[in-house]
Image: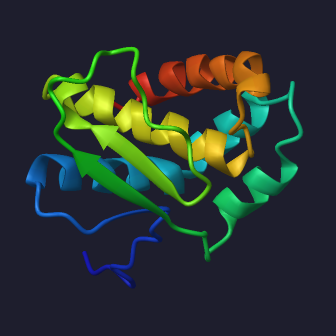
Amino acid sequence: MLLTSNRIDMYLHYFGKQSFTNRAVNKANRILISSFYQNEIEKHLDFIDAAYFIQELKSNEPKPIQVISTWAPFRTKKETFPMQADAISINRSQIRNSRSLLIIKLLQDYTCIRLNLLNSSQNEERERVHKIIEKLAKSYL
C-alpha cells in the first residue's frame, strides 16, 4: 500500500534529543490530526466558544506550539511552569516515565493554549477542559 503523503501536520514541535519526549509528541500530533478526535472535541467543548479552535484543528495549516522538556527533580509537584501562549513546558521528573501521562498533558496544554485559557481567572474552565481531554486521550492510549 502506497501512501500519497507521509506529511504529518505538526501541532506540537519538539527539537530536543530525548527520544521518550519525541515519541510522546509524535503520538500527540497523530491524535490531534485524527478526525475522530477532532469530532469528539467539537461535541464535548460545548460550554466554551471553541469554534476557532475546532476550525484550526481541522485545517491543514495548524499553528505549531513548541514543547520544552526539562528535568527538575527537586521542584515540588505544586510548582508548575506558567502557561505560555507559544510553548508547553514539561518537567519530565514529574511525569514518572509514563508516556501516556505525557501525551495527556501535551493534549491538555495544547487545547488550553489554543482556547486562550491561560490566566488564573479561568481555572474552572481549564479544569473542565483537562478532564474532557484526559477521557478522550485515554481512548487512544
Q: Residue at x 71, y 26 (%)?
A: 120
Q: Within the image, what quadrant is residue 140 found in?
A: top left
Residue farthest toward the front in the current orientation of the protein: 74
Q: Position of residue 14 (x, y in %)?
A: 30, 63
74 w.r.t. 66: above or below: above
Q: Residue at x 33, y 54 (%)?
A: 68
Q: Within the image, what quadrant is residue 36 found in?
A: top right
25 w.r.t. 82: above or below: below
**112 or 119: nearer the eye?**
119
Image side of residue 126 versus residue 31, left or right: right
Q: Residue at x 22, y 45 (%)?
A: 70
**6 or 121: nearer the eye?**
121
Quarter that holds the C terminus: top left
Image side of residue 50 versus residue 141, left or right: right
Q: Position of residue 40 (x, y in %)?
A: 66, 34
Quarter that holds the N terminus: bottom left
- Answer yes or no: is residue 7 visible: yes
